[in-house]
C-alpha cells in the first residue's frame, strides 16, 4: 500500500528533475546574448511602462533606442538628466525634451452641464457610455467617473468630488497620453507644457443651443478670434481652437469671451 503511493511520487519527481535539467541545458545552449547597452539604457529610463512612447514598455523602447530606431526623448517622462545618461551610454545625442501636459477640455462641471438621467452604475466613464452614450446631454461633456484617473500611473489626474471637476495636476503630468487614449468622450488633449490659455469646451453647438445644454460652453461667437492680435485663435466648426505655436498667453481672449469658456491657468 505504502509502496503503491510512494512509487508514483518518486517517479514523477524523477521525471520532473530530468525535464528540468533538459530545459536548463536548452536555455543555456540557445541563450541569445543581450547587448549590454540595452540593459544600461533600460536602467536610465523612468521605468513607468506607460506606453506613451509608442512601444510596449521600457524594455522595448530601450532596445529600439540602442538599435537607432528612435531617440530616447520619445519617452514623455524623460528628464534632461536621464537623457544625458543615455547620451553618454550611446555616445550620441539623445535629443531634446518637448514636454507636454494633458488638459481636460471641459468646463461643464456640476450644475453647469445638464444630465439626461441619474447614473447609478459602475463608476467608470466607459461603462457609463453603455447607457445612452453617457448621462450628459452634451456629447462632449466630462462625466467625471474617473476612467482617466485610473489610467494615469503618475497620479496626475484628480477629482474634486464636491464640484465633480476632473483636472490635471501639472506638477505630476508627464504627457504620456494614457488618459487621452481611454477617454470615451475624446476630450483630453496634450498641449505644450508652457501653454496657459485653453478653451475648456469641445462642443460644436452654437449660441443658444450650446448654452441650453451647458452654461460653460463656447457659443461660437468668434469674438476671441477678432480680439487676438497674434492670429492664434480660429473658429473650427463653431468652436474656438488655439494655435499654441502662435499663442503668447496674453489672456486677451479670456477677458473678451462672453461665455467664460476660455481660461488662463
Image (cartoon, grey):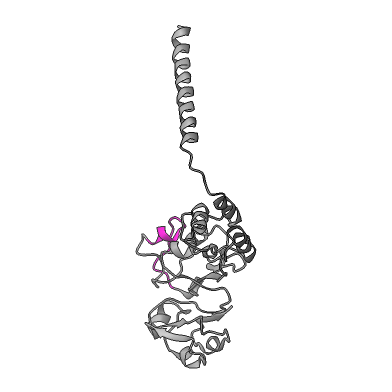
**Most distant residue in the top direction:** 1
Is residue 41 visible in the rendered structure shown here? yes
Residue 51 picture location, percent across and down? 48, 58
Q: Residue 41 or 258: which is nearer the viewer?
A: 41
Quadrant in which residue 234 is drawn: bottom left
Residue 142 picture location, percent across and down? 46, 68
Residue 233 picture location, percent across and down? 47, 86
| Residue in the image at 44% along x and 9% along y | 4
User: In the displayed structure, does residue 207 sit left or right of residue 106?
Assistant: left
Q: Which SS type dominates the magenta stretch?
A: loop
**Most distant residue in the right direction:** 81
Q: Residue 89 or 245: which is nearer the viewer?
A: 89
Q: Residue 164 or 236: which is nearer the viewer?
A: 236
User: In the displayed structure, does residue 83 sit left or right of residue 53?
Assistant: right
| Residue in the image at 62% along x and 66% along y | 80
Report the span colored magenta. Answer: 114-129
In reply to whether residue 69 is colored magenta, the answer given is no
Q: How many labels does the image show?
A: 0
Q: Residue 16 or 230: which is nearer the viewer?
A: 16
Quadrant in which residue 78 is drawn: bottom right
Amino acid at each position: 500500500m505504502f509502496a503503491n503511493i510512494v512509487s508514483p511520487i518518486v517517479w514523477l519527481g524523477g521525471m520532473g528533475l530530468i525535464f528540468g535539467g533538459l530545459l536548463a541545458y536548452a536555455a543555456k545552449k540557445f541563450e541569445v546574448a543581450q547587448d549590454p547597452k540595452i540593459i544600461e539604457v533600460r536602467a536610465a529610463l523612468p521605468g513607468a511602462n506607460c506606453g506613451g512612447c509608442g512601444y510596449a514598455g521600457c524594455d522595448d523602447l530601450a532596445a529600439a533606442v540602442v538599435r537607432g530606431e528612435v531617440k530616447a526623448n520619445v519617452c514623455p517622462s524623460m528628464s534632461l538628466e536621464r537623457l544625458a545618461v543615455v547620451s553618454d551610454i550611446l555616445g550620441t545625442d539623445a535629443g531634446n525634451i518637448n514636454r507636454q501636459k494633458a488638459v481636460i477640455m471641459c468646463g461643464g462641471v456640476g450644475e453647469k452641464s445638464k444630465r439626461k438621467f441619474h447614473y447609478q452604475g459602475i463608476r467608470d466613464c466607459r461603462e457609463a457610455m453603455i447607457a445612452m452614450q453617457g448621462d450628459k446631454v452634451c456629447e462632449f461633456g466630462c462625466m467625471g467617473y474617473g476612467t482617466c484617473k485610473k489610467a494615469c500611473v503618475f497620479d496626475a489626474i484628480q477629482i474634486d468630488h464636491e464640484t465633480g471637476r476632473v483636472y490635471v495636476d501639472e506638477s505630476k503630468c508627464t504627457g504620456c497620453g494614457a488618459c487621452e487614449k481611454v477617454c470615451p468622450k475624446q476630450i483630453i488633449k496634450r498641449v505644450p507644457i508652457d501653454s496657459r490659455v485653453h478653451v475648456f469646451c469641445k462642443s460644436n453647438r452654437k449660441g443658444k443651443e450650446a448654452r441650453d445644454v451647458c452654461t460653460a460652453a463656447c457659443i461660437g461667437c468668434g469674438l476671441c478670434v477678432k480680439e487676438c492680435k497674434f492670429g492664434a485663435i480660429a473658429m473650427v466648426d463653431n468652436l474656438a481652437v488655439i494655435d499654441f505655436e502662435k499663442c503668447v498667453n496674453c489672456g486677451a481672449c479670456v477677458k473678451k469671451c462672453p461665455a467664460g469658456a476660455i481660461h488662463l491657468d
